[in-house]
Amino acid sequence: MALEDYQGDMEMCCRCSACKFIPMQKVKGLQYTNVCPSIAKYNYHAYSGGGRLNIAVAMLKDGFKYTDKLLDIVYNCQMCGACGVSCNYAMDMEVLEPISEFRMKCNEDGKTNPALDKVIAGLRKQGSMVPARGKRGDWAAGLNLKDATKEKVDVLYHVGCLTSYDRNMQKLAKATVKILQKAGVNFGIAGDAETCCGGRAYQMGYKEDFLNQAKKNMNMIKKAGVKTVVTSCADGYQAFKVLYDKYNLKGDLEVLHISEYIDKLIKDGKLKPRKKVAIPVTYHDPCRLGRLGEPWIHWEGKKVPGDRFVFDPPKEYRRGTKGVYEPPRDVLNSIPGIKLTEMTRIKEYSWCCGAGGGVNDSNPGFARWTARERIEEAVSTGAEAIVTACPWCEKNFTEAIKESGSSLKVYDIVEILEKAI
Amino acid sequence: MALSKDIYKALEDVVGEENICDDPAIMPAYFSIEFAAVILPKDTAEVQAIIKLCNKYKLQFRPICTGWTGGFPKGIILLDLRRMNRIIEINEKNMYAVVEPYVISAQLQAELFKRGLNFCIKGAGTNCSALLRGHGHMDQTTSGDDRNHLAIEWVTPEGDIVRSGSLGSSDEWFCGDGPGPSIRSILTSAVPPGVTPGVFTKAAVKLYHWPGPAIFPIEGLSPRYTLKEIPANMMARYYSFPSVEKMWQAEIKLGEAEVCFELMGFNAAMVACNITTCNEEEEEVFAKLNSEVQGPGFFVIIGGNYPEDFEYKKRVLQQIVSEAGGKSLKSVEDPEIEGILLCQCTRISASIRETFRAGGAFNSIPIMGQRDLTIKWAIGAGKAKEPLIEKGLIVDDGGAFFGWGVEQGHLGKTEIFCKFDPLNAEAKAAVEGWQKEQSTRAFKERYFALTMGPQDEIGPALSNYHLWWSKITKALDPNGVSPEGGALV
């Protein structure tokens, strides 16, 4: 669907400002009430979910008049979808979809962000969202992993760009492998044949690049006869599970995040966390595993003429309700010694880590500011570590912690589990 | 209407480069008109400096909070008060809180609940400014309107800082009328005419006892949050009555008995809005509830301070309702539904469901006044909605109105609105016509006078208040820089 297709939704915005805050019933005080990093940082209403819709619908009517400020607004958004969850508590309207289409429209009109162009140039050249040093599968050297493109496996572990290439993040891939091996899973990787999922290109507004990546991945998967993909990256999870489905590319591929998969392994008795890990932790819901990990709902219909904004057939909105929230918590709670304390902003109204939407590339300062807000919230729980389930979150938190001097530790869920098995 | 470089620089020097913007890209985010600039002041001193510059250069300005209403003339300076978001003080002993304009009601209430206190959240919703004056679901025990404002810090249209009531004499916020200057008649209504020009930069709001928990035990995910359990000594019910007269009789008696924490005269359509998560579900549930009710009704929350108090209040409630022939709506007795309503109707978190969700707009006639009289008028206004419903121009709510007692029924509020699709020109015209007709009827038939109505007609009947107000605003704003424009919710 194009931006024009969301005109009715955008015109439903009543400028109530709910999109700026966590759902009202969840407000527990003055602190940790903001849900949208962009409006929280930049303050002008234009940076809120509703403000973006109001601008987009005005431009649909009056023409697209690009200014530097407009592009600043468009690209200083993590596309985290929190605005939509808060809005959709009360309203029946799409919020993130038109915001995403607006960014794609900017892209189509050549109004791109130079830093993001550079990242996409790398993607086109190297099939990666991060600089590719060496080969994609180098991290697995000596681990004797199955090549899923050549050998029959039950599960393809899609590692992702950041975990594959960033030397500081490769530990996540190794921890994942250790866990899967311990549980006796017949899995493999695609190694050098793996390519970027395209999810972050989509977030940045480069739809064609996303589709190219999606097609490459699905061709490889079909050729290899893979039925189940497990990702350890929330962006990858959302790409395979939600976005590929949105564009009818997913077929009947089963897509699981590693937290879901290990939760199942634990509950099936195939994995037993036995060692005590005595760390007070808090858990950060990655946006694209949580609210944006909710399955895509295919729908086509028309507005019913009349007084209400209703459709034929009825439209079911994705309100963040069906994201992956409990499996990572269940995994943490299964580890002896772990004390999990929740932050204020969790699950469907979780605060973004700051790295989404390409903001870590286009405006690293804003990405780290967003992360620092989260770190402060994590520290307020008394936790010594923040656990997440996405390498992009971990990287951004780590950088922000380094900058701020906080003593908070950051772990991916596989790192914590690895300690316990 | 671009600002000259010199004026822009002068304003920028006050708030800093990041906090002023005249780029046309940001304007439609606020409203579909061009402002000369949007400015984000951080405190009273900055507001004052901006206003003084506005007077110097004869520039009009208007403030805005989270607001979904307000009229904004083209070319004005918009003061977005978003950065003024501090709770200055919560004074538990003297039961008031001092807030800046962009503290939202949900934030203040959450802080108050922890202290066993509460305040009046306006019906516009908990997402709106805590400083806003008006009425809301909890008026029965938290009063409403200007009765809740104590001392106020106000930057006048000429840029003077005025501190009203006790603040003017002793730096204390506990009273709006003294010792110190009482200017209650000027720091006035939330609806035009009479929206005080200038900017309220801080206000003390009155606090009340809260009999409920520090935090509601919410479970589930948006949009369906439920309560793990009904908090101790709390109960929510909806009662319908055989007639308006019977309902009114019960409402009066309950007020006299002072047993209700909340008495909100919801109609079945508004209950349906609250407990449903989408438009389609709302239509279904409304049909079901409509078949269950025997006539008009109200929603009640009882909050006991201890078990015996709770039992007493329940018994009194049951007796009064029973004497008036009231019937409890079974759907609301379901603990899940009861919990949803209990939480939402104290946190006031579903106002948008009640108003905007259906079609995207609503036009309302709200009236503060003698309940029995305004109810009689509202019955007629409800009947006048029926042809619009039949034509499919407005949402079918059974032609219902709603209202509630304020301060245990000493005062009352009645309201009726039409929900519609604002893009449907026929519907918009029909609703505006209905609104005008019913407001005129209210005045002509001597039910009440809406000060938002035609002032040349209404003013002479009300001591020519509009002429007095015009003189007052002219004296306060000799340069005409602070145009009136509606409530800032």
Image (tube, rainbow, N blue to C red):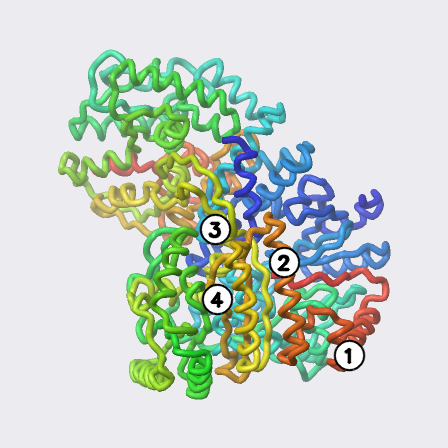
Q: Quadrant of the C terminus of chain B?
A: bottom right
Chain holding disc 2? B
User: Mark 3 or mark 4, which is nearer to you?
Assistant: 3
Dividing the picture into quadrants, the one containing residue B304 is: bottom left
Query: Is residue A135 positioned above or below B316 on the image?
Result: above
User: Mark 1 or mark 2, which is nearer to you?
Assistant: 1
Mark 4 closeness class: few <14, some 14–19, many ≥20 residues within 10 Å: many
Q: The disc labelled 4 sits on which kind of residue?
A: Gln
Which residue in the structure is indicated by mark 4?
B109
> Is residue A409 visible in the rendered structure shown here?
no
Q: Which mark is residue A91?
A: 3
Q: Which mark is residue B69?
A: 2
Q: Is residue A100 left or right of residue A234?
A: right
Whole-number angstrom distance, CA of label 3 to CA of label 2? 18 Å
Q: Which mark is residue B460?
A: 1
Mark 3 closeness class: few <14, some 14–19, many ≥20 residues within 10 Å: many
Chain holding disc 4? B
User: Mark 1 or mark 4, which is nearer to you?
Assistant: 1
- Looking at the rendered structure, whether the residues under marks 3 and 2 are on a common chain is answered as no
Q: Secondary structure at mark 3?
A: loop
Chain holding disc 3? A
Q: Secondary structure at mark 4?
A: helix
Whole-number angstrom distance, CA of label 4 to CA of label 2? 22 Å
Q: Position of residue A224 (x, y in %)?
A: 26, 15
